[in-house]
Image (cartoon, rainbow, N blue to C red):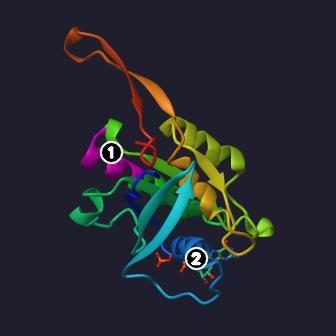
Amino acid sequence: MSAPPKQRKIAFMGFRSVGKSSLIIQFVENHFVDNYEPTIENTFHKSLKLGGQEYHLQVVDTAGQDEYSIIPQSYFMNINGYVLVYSVNSEKSFSVAKFVYQRLLDMKGQMDVPVVLVANKTDLRMERVVSYEDGKKLADSWKAPFIEASAKENSLSFLIFEQFEENSCVTVSDDSDNATTEGTTCRNKILAS
Ligand SMILES: Nc1nc2c(ncn2[C@@H]2O[C@H](COP(=O)(O)OP(=O)(O)OP(=O)(O)O)[C@@H](O)[C@H]2O)c(=O)[nH]1
């Protein structure tokens, strides 16, 4: 008998127009939308089989944020993981990704935020201003997986979700109150748990 499906809710966040909706639509409907319509909020549903386990995913497409955004409380509750998206042709979108990550940490606490960092629009080679190395360095500093993608050229979105299944355990050390405790946290293992 196969295991019952697991329900997981994942939010895409990041600056306006970086391609959050496009990545999700590639993943859910397998096509690319060329026109731009700002998102207010949208939830998509998709079933997915990873490692023999069936998942019922709810994918929340959020309205683009910037560093002045007040992020709704609902984005911090009942969400299993976050995909933070920037586009490689926008320095501003890269700094907004850092801002959103910081807000997530403030709201949820360091150990509780499974994140995947996604650099989108890699097809815009001539317009690239954020290098692979810069993106990777940022993701490494978060101990998060990093994926470069192009919603236009191909559908790497599946990979994004696979990252949440990975067992990316990191050792954390907390020496507050002079009592050093060490532990291991598996921040990204939300699909597998
Ligand atoms: N060249 C290129 N264009 C893309 C890519 N992904 C998205 N776009 C285009 O960028 C524009 C914005 O894409 P959206 O998916 O609406 O971006 P968004 O992040 O959901 O935008 P908001 O709703 O404002 O937050 C659209 O015109 C897309 O066609 C990509 O990988 N390459």
User: Can residue 18 be seen in this snapshot?
Assistant: no
Indicate which quadrant contains ligand 1. Answer: bottom right
Give residue 133's position: percent from left, percent from top: 69, 44
Numbered disc in front, either 2 or 1:
2
* Magenta stretch in the rendered image: 101-109
Q: Is mark 2 within 8 Å of ligand 1?
A: yes
The type of residue carrying mark 2 is Ser
Q: Residue placed at 32% from the left, 52% from the top? A: 103
Left or right of residue 110, residue 121 in this image: right
Element carrying mark 1: helix
Element carrying mark 2: helix
Q: Residue placed at 42% from the left, 38% from the top? A: 187
Badge number at residue 22:
2
User: Can residue 65 be seen in this snapshot?
Assistant: yes
Which quadrant would the C terminus be assigned to in this image?
top left
Give residue 186's position: percent from left, percent from top: 43, 33
Category of crowding for the residue at label 2, using alpha-carbon neighbours closer than 10 angstroms: few (below 14), some (14–19), many (at least 20): many
Q: Residue placed at 23% from the left, 9% from the top? A: 179
Task: Identify the residue under disc 1.
Answer: 105
Left or right of residue 32, residue 80 in this image: left
Q: Residue placed at 56% from the left, 87% from the top? A: 36
**Residue ranking furthest to the front:** 1
